[in-house]
Amino acid sequence: MRQRQLKGCQQIHDVLSSFQASDDARTLGHVHHSPPMSVKHAGTKDAFTRDWALIKLDREKFPDGFGFENAVDLQISLFRKLCHLINKHNQRFCKDPPATYKFPNNKLMRLQGTVPVDELLGRSSSAVIANHDGCRNIVMKWGSETRLTAGIMLDIESVARHCFGGVEEESYELAVMHLSNPHEFDSHLPYGFSDPGDSGAIVFDLKGRIIGMLTGGSGRNYGVDCAYVTPIAKLQSDIEQTIGRRVRIL
C-alpha cells in the first residue's frame, strides 16, 4: 500500500518537475478569447450570464501521453461526510432511494458529458421519471474558496440581477440550495454551497455529468443559501457562435 502511494507521488513529482525549468516552461497557454462579462440575450427569457474565457493550451508543454480529461480530486476527508449526507437525504426524501453513493475507487470523479437544459428544468421525459418519487437532483462543485460542497438543484429557473456599467439587467440561472442537515451540524463542512471566490467552478451531478458554471449566489440570508449556475449548454453554444467552431468537452 505504502509503495503504491510513494510511486503515485513520484509520478506526480515527475510531471510537475517538467514545469520548473524556467518561467517559460510554466506558461501553459494563453487566453484565446474572453468577452466582457455581460448578460447575453438581455430582456428575453433566454437571458444568461456571459462570463467565460477560452484558454488555448500549448501541447508541447505537457508530457507525452498526457490526458486532458476533466476530473475532480476527491481525496479529502470531507468527501466521506458528504457521501453520508447525500445518502441520508435520499433515504429521507425519495420513495424509491437510489443505490448508495460510494467513494470512487480511484479517488477521482471523471467529468464527462453534459446535462441538457430541458432535463435540468424537469421538462424531459427522463427528468419526469427521475423526479416522480420526490427525489431532487443532487449536485456538487469544487471551488477555490469552499472546495467540495453538495447541493440540491431546483427544477425552476431563478432570476439573478446584475449591474454592468450602472445598468441593471436580469438573467435566468439555475438555482442550487445547499445540502445540509440542521439537526446534525458538522463544523467541518462548509456552511453554504458557495462563497465569494468560488465563481467559475464547474457544477456536476453524481454521474459526473457537467451541469454548468457557478456565477454567483445570494449569500447566507436568514439561513438560506442559494447559488446561481449558468447551464453549460448555453455557455458551450455561446462559445461556438463566438469563435465559429464546434466545441467538444473532453
Image (spheres, rainbow, N blue to C red):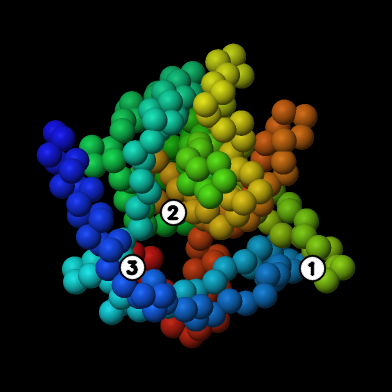
188 with respect to 109 (left or right)? right
Q: Earlier in the sequence, mark 2 or mark 3?
A: 3
Dot 3, crowdedness within 10 Å: few (<14), some or many (≥20)? few
Identified at 14% across, 33% down, the residue is: 1
Residue position for label 3: 20
State yes or no: discs 2 and 3 in contact (Cβ < 8 Å): no
Badge nearest the viewer, 1 or 3 = 3
The reply to whether residue 10 is visible in this rendering is yes
Q: Earlier in the sequence, mark 1 or mark 2?
A: 1
Q: Position of residue 16 (x, y in %)?
A: 30, 61
Q: Is residue 44 above or below residue 83?
A: below
64 with respect to 167 (left or right)? left
Residue position for label 2: 210
Q: Residue furthest bottom?
A: 244
| Residue at mark 1 to residue at mark 3: CA–CA distance | 40 Å
Towards the viewer: 118 or 153: 153
Residue position for label 1: 164
Badge nearest the viewer, 2 or 3 = 3
| Residue at mark 2 to residue at mark 3: CA–CA distance | 32 Å
Identified at 56% across, 23% down, the residue is: 187
Q: Secondary structure at mark 2?
A: strand
